[in-house]
Image (spheres, coloured by chain):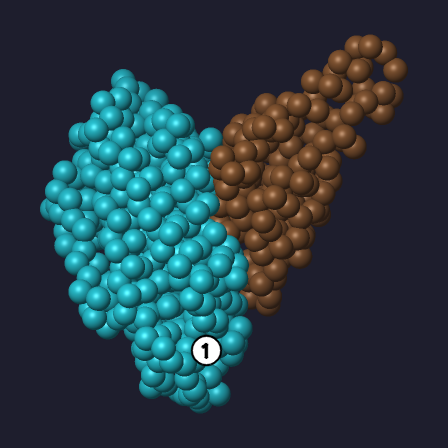
Chain colours: A brown, B cyan
């Protein structure tokens, strides 16, 4: 492995930009993602920067069961994220639909049907520490040696 | 008359300032915003349709998941509506514990709203301070109910679990700490000159236009309208609750109303702890058939449930009216129209604390 690759891996492991998209949740997981920003959990000490711009993101946090309004849009959003990228499903909703996946509802879970999901964090809602752990755990498997793996 | 619009600027659905997907189409002339159109429909899950035909044991969990930020009040209004239909009495101790849980939930919701506003006007220091205080409130909520967000604490005839004497002592210590911190932060917000430049005189919602657009909650109380459904609730009446009202009608007033309500909530919780009597926390009863329209005060305003049940305790019909839809209307038709720049659109929108998840359900 070249020195350049080592430098890239080192930089990428301490600089992860996160974007989150809400595809029809109850807001419970949203505020737990927001709570990661709080000084107690302090997501930025791991070099993770949360903002909402897909064009400069590395990790997409998907929150919520899939509603029809996102049918066209989520895939477009996913394509806007530059490589290397990964999506994490936060909460039960994007995994199974949770309480909303019943007869008569409009949701269409799981989100994995629409975009590739790298990690799933179950819970209704999961704790901020679990969300943080999920982002940190996919860091090495997705971003390390990306150029080597691509070949 | 034909309206000249220079540029149509769309904001959203994925936007750094909005927690939830909503699309605002701003019509501008120069820098000035002359009209805003709001586009909803990214979060519609059809939760009322799922609720119909299910027993109350399932619907109480669904009601909680209408909105994750103010889950306790959805739980409380639904359960109290069921209790009113069936004539179930609540033990005194449980009634006060409900108020404590509700006020803790209101505190964390208001802190989150003020955090969002400070974050939107790029005052990140104050925003992080407020988010740190919110974690203390979440701890207390977790200690009382057992969960951080969707806690299902309130059940027909009482509450799920009791508060221990040592937890009461910790709650009091935490409240003291939260209060002393919040005094400092509220003063920072009230007297900060840079914050005043971004907040005072921006997003004006006059009392008359607030009435016309049916604004509710802190948005209405920031415009001098004395409306609060807690004044009609029997337990709050016992505690002698008085609503907080400000008359400045701008973004600053709405955020200050939330700060004042935080202090009011702390006072209410202290009063509840003082008057808490020994006794059972859960009585008995049978859910019966009936129909009722019942309202409560959510952190964002008046929340109304219209429920019809059958003799087995199943929900045959339910309609939920959430506060955010009125505030979004007030925001788009009155507050944002005429602000000086696009930068003020997001901050004005966030100052009304819109919750898209409970608007669309």
Residue at the spot of label 1: B315
Q: Chain of mark 1?
A: B
Badge 1, how many Cα within 10 Å: few under 14, some, many 20+?
Answer: many
Quadrant for residue A11, please give it. top right
Q: Residue at x 20, y 69 (%)?
A: B237
Q: Residue at x 26, y 22 (%)?
A: B194
Residue B162 visible? The answer is yes
Residue B4, percent across and down? 25, 24
Q: Is residue A130 above or below residue B239?
A: above
Name the side, left or right, on which A27 lies relative to B188: right
Q: How many marks?
A: 1
Residue B33 visible? The answer is no
Q: Residue at x 60, y 51 (%)?
A: A126
Residue A122, percent across and down? 66, 53
Q: Residue at x 46, y 84 (%)?
A: B313
Q: Nearer the viewer, residue B139 or A33?
A: B139
Q: Nearer the viewer, residue B331 or B201?
A: B201
């Amino acid at each position: 492995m070249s020195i350049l690759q080592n430098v890239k891996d080192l930089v990428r492991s301490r600089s992860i930009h996160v974007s989150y998209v809400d595809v029809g949740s109850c807001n419970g997981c949203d505020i737990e993602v927001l709570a990661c920003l709080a000084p107690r959990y302090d997501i930025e000490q791991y070099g993770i920067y949360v903002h909402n711009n897909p064009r400069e993101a590395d990790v997409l946090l998907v929150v919520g069961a899939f509603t029809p309004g996102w049918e066209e849009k989520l895939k477009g959003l996913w394509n806007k994220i530059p490589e290397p990228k990964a999506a994490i499903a936060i909460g039960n909703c994007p995994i199974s639909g949770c309480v909303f996946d019943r007869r008569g509802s409009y949701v269409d879970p799981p989100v994995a049907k629409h975009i590739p999901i790298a990690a799933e964090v179950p819970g209704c809602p999961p704790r901020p520490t679990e969300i943080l752990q999920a982002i940190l755990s996919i860091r090495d498997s997705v971003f390390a040696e990306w150029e080597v793996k691509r070949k | 008359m034909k309206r000249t619009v220079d540029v149509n600027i769309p904001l959203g659905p994925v936007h750094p300032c909005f927690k939830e997907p909503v699309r605002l189409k701003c019509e501008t002339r120069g820098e000035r915003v002359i009209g805003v159109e709001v586009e909803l429909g990214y979060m519609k899950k059809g939760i009322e349709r799922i609720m119909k035909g299910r027993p109350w044991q399932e619907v109480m969990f669904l009601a909680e998941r209408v909105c994750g930020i103010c889950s306790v009040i959805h739980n409380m209004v639904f359960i109290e509506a069921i209790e009113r239909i069936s004539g179930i009495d609540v033990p005194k101790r449980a009634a006060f514990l409900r108020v404590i849980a509700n006020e803790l939930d209101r505190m964390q919701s208001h802190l989150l709203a003020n955090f969002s506003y400070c974050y939107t006007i790029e005052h990140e220091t104050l925003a992080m301070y407020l988010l740190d205080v919110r974690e203390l409130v979440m701890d207390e909520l977790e200690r009382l109910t057992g969960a951080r967000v969707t806690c299902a604490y309130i059940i027909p005839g009482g509450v799920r679990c009791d508060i221990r004497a040592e937890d009461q002592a910790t709650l009091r210590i935490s409240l003291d700490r939260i209060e002393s911190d919040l005094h400092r932060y509220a003063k920072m917000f009230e007297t900060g000159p840079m914050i005043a430049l971004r907040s005072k005189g921006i997003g004006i919602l006059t009392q008359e236009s607030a009435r016309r657009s049916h604004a509710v909650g802190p948005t209405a109380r920031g415009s001098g309208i004395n409306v609060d459904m807690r004044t009609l609730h029997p337990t709050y009446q016992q505690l002698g609750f008085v609503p907080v009202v400000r008359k400045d009608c701008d973004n600053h007033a709405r955020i200050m109303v939330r700060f004042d309500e935080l202090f009011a909530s702390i006072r209410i919780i202290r009063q509840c702890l003082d008057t808490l009597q020994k006794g059972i926390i859960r009585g008995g009863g049978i859910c019966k058939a009936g129909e009722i329209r019942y309202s409560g005060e959510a952190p964002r305003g008046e929340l109304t449930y219209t429920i019809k049940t059958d003799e087995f305790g199943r929900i045959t019909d339910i309609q939920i009216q959430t506060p955010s839809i009125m505030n979004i209307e007030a925001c788009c038709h009155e507050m944002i129209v005429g602000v000086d720049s696009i930068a003020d659109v997001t901050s004005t929108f966030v100052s009304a604390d819109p919750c898209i998840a409970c608007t669309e359900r």
